[in-house]
Amino acid sequence: MLIPLLGIAQEINSPDGDLHLKFKLVNGKPQYQLNFKGNPVIKPSFLGLELKNIPSMVEGFEVEKTEKQTVDTSWNPVWGEEKVIRNHYNELLVTLYQPEYYRNIRIRFRLFNDGLGFRYEFPRQENLSYFVIEEEKTQFRLSGNHKIFWIPGDYDTNEYPYTTSKISEIPGLQEEATIEITAQSPIENPSVQTPSMMKSDDGLYINIHEAALQNYPAMQLDVNAKDFLLTSHLVPDAVGNKGYIQTGAHSPWRTIVVSDDARDILSSRLILNLNDPTNYEDVSWIHPMKYMGVWWEYFVTGKSTWAYAKETNTKLEEDPTNLTPSGRHGANTEHVKEYIDFAAENGFDAVLVEGWNIGWEDWIGNWKEEVFDFVTPYPDYDVEEVNKYAHSKGVEIIMHHETGASATNYERRLDTAFRFMDKYGYDAVKTGYVGQIVPRGEHHDGQWMVNHYIHVAREAADHEIMVNSHEAVRPTGLHRTYPNWIAQESARGTEFEAMAGLAPEHATILPFTRLMGGPMDYTPGIFQLDLSAYGNDDHNVNTTLAKQLAYYVTMYSPLQMAADLPENYKKYPDAFQFIKDVAVDWDQSFILEAEPGDYVTIARKAKNKKEWYVGGITDENARTAEISFDFLPKGEKYIATIYADGKDAGWNTNQHSYSIKKVVVDSKSRLKQKLAPGGGVAISVKEGSKEEQKGLKRI
Amino acid sequence: MLIPLLGIAQEINSPDGDLHLKFKLVNGKPQYQLNFKGNPVIKPSFLGLELKNIPSMVEGFEVEKTEKQTVDTSWNPVWGEEKVIRNHYNELLVTLYQPEYYRNIRIRFRLFNDGLGFRYEFPRQENLSYFVIEEEKTQFRLSGNHKIFWIPGDYDTNEYPYTTSKISEIPGLQEEATIEITAQSPIENPSVQTPSMMKSDDGLYINIHEAALQNYPAMQLDVNAKDFLLTSHLVPDAVGNKGYIQTGAHSPWRTIVVSDDARDILSSRLILNLNDPTNYEDVSWIHPMKYMGVWWEYFVTGKSTWAYAKETNTKLEEDPTNLTPSGRHGANTEHVKEYIDFAAENGFDAVLVEGWNIGWEDWIGNWKEEVFDFVTPYPDYDVEEVNKYAHSKGVEIIMHHETGASATNYERRLDTAFRFMDKYGYDAVKTGYVGQIVPRGEHHDGQWMVNHYIHVAREAADHEIMVNSHEAVRPTGLHRTYPNWIAQESARGTEFEAMAGLAPEHATILPFTRLMGGPMDYTPGIFQLDLSAYGNDDHNVNTTLAKQLAYYVTMYSPLQMAADLPENYKKYPDAFQFIKDVAVDWDQSFILEAEPGDYVTIARKAKNKKEWYVGGITDENARTAEISFDFLPKGEKYIATIYADGKDAGWNTNQHSYSIKKVVVDSKSRLKQKLAPGGGVAISVKEGSKEEQKGLKRI
């Protein structure tokens, strides 16, 4: 029975009452608004989709039905920042009807204490089985000219540096912000990518992103800088279409995380809660890990390369033993064994080996399809020997599948590639998508590639393989559903410290943007920060050494790399101890201090251990972190080892200056810790006998 | 050392001296011309390629080197029209140099007695590793306003009916010729597809096509109707590019088969000779075969369907037992067993089963990617039971992989699909590509799909599976290299007799056009020609019954279907005997009479048997075929069974009227056989004892 509810608003509150959502039809057009503590977060904004060749889903609607429910449950992730996550929301499900076309859609809103998620649902129905999206027209009408931390809209890359500006300034800054990146497809009109972090003049923090991106293109945001209006802009396919839908489907969730305390943004689990639970029957083979790799040396030393040969025109079908060795090939058996030895001695789980397989001589820039085969090593790399050696020392080798963005080639060879991994006992792969996508005309962030990454994760799961994808679409919490998709890059990471340097504030923005969707393989731990040591006088790594340690806590990931060369860790064994100690999986996380673009201080309790790790970082400005240890169990004393910036340290001066001291702490301890400009602090907190505590200062 | 040969023409003759090729540079532009017995076939025509973003390869050339050689060898195909094929040609290899860009290309000409093949070669060189073709600019400047048998240029389908006209008339007829076909992409300007068959006013037959199409787009021909100039037009990819080349590569061969006797066109093996020999180590598992199938009933009876369910929105991941059966599903276990029984009783090798697997309810028209999974049968089809039953009766089941043109989906699932086939003992698959291609924006005849079909053939070979591809790019002789790619459709076949009817001349044109590239799964053998028997009063199958028999000889294929329903064969058991008898592999073929668009009469000797089969067909006009039996061994007598049109027969009247008689023949026998309008004749010639010959007339 059709109950026309024209013009009657439907409303729900968040469980704590702070957030208020109102939905109504305005002249047949769906509209929502969101308030926080009585003030608008999203002013009345329209919802809908334009369709290809058939009437749109933006107007002509009646409300057919509305349903409400409250859910309050909790669940345990396979790995994560918390061992228990509460999922508590009030839901409003609106069924809309277009009488002119006999069509239904639904809009499902879930209002949590930390924000709103909503999505379009396309139920199976007689008059609509298939359609193509021309554009999604979801509006986010902001209440003012907020400060925004943004990277420009682009269909193929997220590796831009962040620009901080007012919304009104975006159009003027767009060109400057769109620096050159390999295989980029910038959107011409003013636009930004998500997760998009904003702060209003009166201190409201707003983060817009999406959750559970499956079988749909990624969402970017067109910017109307005059009206502070953001509108969804989907990534097109090769022929300009923006999503092929078979009804009995839904869009990803559009997410708005809101608080007047920046720390709540970082502790929000809204995006994870909006993803589906995993349906993997067995997850025992999935494990967080710490690794080293034959990797950073390619960027900084100038001495070794991924490629093996002098030739610059090679073909997969040709015998690699006919190639002319350049003498600079990094991934040779002997050299990799040095990494294995060091990793084993220092308790690392794994060693990543890049450049082990044929194809690197001319892999980039040619839009080549048959670029790698994923199974043929260079003549100087003995796959069996290296794996045997590693396993004999309790270390895994991480497989590397650079695809050169040729996804069709990868899919064709995927089964063979995973069987190869099974044969030699690999249990993790780093995938890479550098370059222009094949199928040609598709984009990294389009529907086809979105499905590709998930296909790879699922196939990998069948082989009990974990995936760490680089240059894939930015994460949207899918690691809840596919927990073997253990980490991603999808942002400007440490590699850019070797190329052009990262702004000191960069790492204070990432947790509020890129990391909202999921863990990042940021590859921290660079100790040789002065790159002139390698003959590079252009620039250095723009951090202090202590800040590199802090990243292991502030940049959440279950997969953490110690990215520097063994020889550099040998120079600073006391500081290296933190990297050896730090956990990669957690019982609980505590956001102690946070301001996007300025600073982040986080404490985390190691999984199933009485150990805590604290990381604090700052931007280019020195500051004093105020660290309360009240996350510790009451009445118990622990030994904290504080890895701090040296007094004279800074991101561009005396970067290697640091101090280490041990103190005794309990839940009442408070620490005022000075951070150098571009600096940081890392603290390990462990149990210690009275003997060990003796003589240590108590704070 | 550079030897400038500016303006000096290079010339070669065919081994028999009838064909003469001249190559020279004209103001730095490569130019060739071809004469037959002193008269121009191809007037001076330019060669070259336009490249994307870099200087073209059409001008600025010097001749660096020319080389000549003569080759005369012979080889044995795995299966074919002949057991021995002679490969005899004179070759001219011209190495060209562009001093301005320090680049080389080569043009290799091979002049056979039956025509010319030439190709572009792109050697590895310091200054050119990768490039993208914007357009190939190969000209074929004809000597006059020839008659041409053509279908309009199209990137996605070859299933047009043929138009016969003067070259000058093409522009005016292009629109009319471009009838509606599922998933078509017609070229806007006047253009035709290859193989393109022409006849000059003075009786010269010219066929233009290509050989060995690998890793390159298919070639169509732009038509300049005023100058009788045809120019290559490559099929673009999703972004409009026309070929990604890595040097150390070459184009396919451009072929011009020439004779003043139309029969020589059909007996030409030039295209096969220009393909590479197979590198399959074992070919013993590849075998020609005759099959029946659950197929024609879907087109004509109106009683059964590929689809199982009433639903029109189905998903692969859903349990098919939840579907609502329509009661009309053709491929059910019981019904398929009826076909198996009939096939076994009548000595057929195999039964094709279409519609066995889930996905048919909404497989077409939605540009759906995940359309079939190739492994899940409908609930009423027991794969194991059907195969067991068939094998127990000495019959194979032919797998059916309709892809819905979703090549990415097929590639993803290919390994699993072939393993499934291995498990149940299938050794052949019919593939189908109906619809718009996924990857979206790609075309059936573009470089990516060209590589896809070959990928499937090669993967199939690893599983000892033969492939019969429908809606793939038209063949170019690749069955020499991939002999398990046993047949293709790629033209308007018998299925259109069920839909709109085929012109009576259609089958007299196909051998001169589509079949020049390779065997066609034409699916002949329709006995119930009057479709009003099924309640279809629109049109009939436009042949006589005898002509349907003749097709088994005139439409060469190592894979021949008896396409009609068992019940129809039971009505005409004496005529059906020819289909049961006729061979599918041959020692030798004899083109007895031929004129494109009018008639074709062919005799073939069965492989390793003293049996011959003769087929003769005519267009809408009655004619008298003059059949000389001088292909028989001298001095030996055989019994010929002649399946002829009835006196009152015709393609649109008394189609089922035929007569069968036996006579004694030897190498001196001559037969004047009347063919009805749209009719044909089929003759089997076998050994017979004196007893059997007794009483038979000797001709």
Image: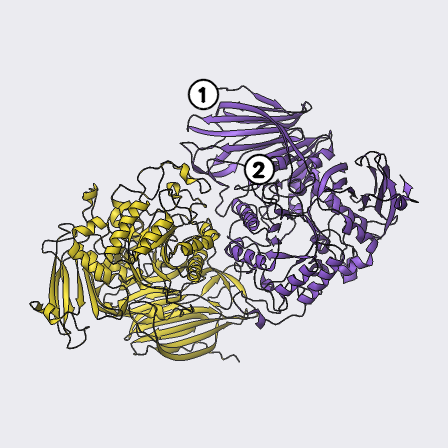
Chain colours: A purple, B yellow
Neighbourhood count class around disc 1 (C-alpha, 10 Å): few under 14, some 14–19, many 20 upward? few
Q: Position of residue B277 (x, y in %)?
A: 40, 70
> Tag 2, which secondary structure?
loop
In the displayed structure, A593 sits above or below B601; it is above
Instruction: State which quarter of the image contains the C terminus of chain B.
Output: bottom left
Question: Which chain is indicated by disc 1?
Answer: A
Relative depth, front residue between B307 and A237: B307
The disc labelled 1 sits on which kind of residue?
A: Leu
- On screen, residue B256 versus residue B201, left or right, reads right
Q: Nearer the viewer, mark 2 or mark 1?
A: 2
- On screen, residue A78 versus residue B692, left or right, reads right
Q: Which residue is mark 1?
A: A2
Total marks in image: 2
Relative depth, front residue between B374 and B52: B374
Q: Position of residue B588 (x, y in %)?
A: 26, 71
**Extreme front residue here?**
B392
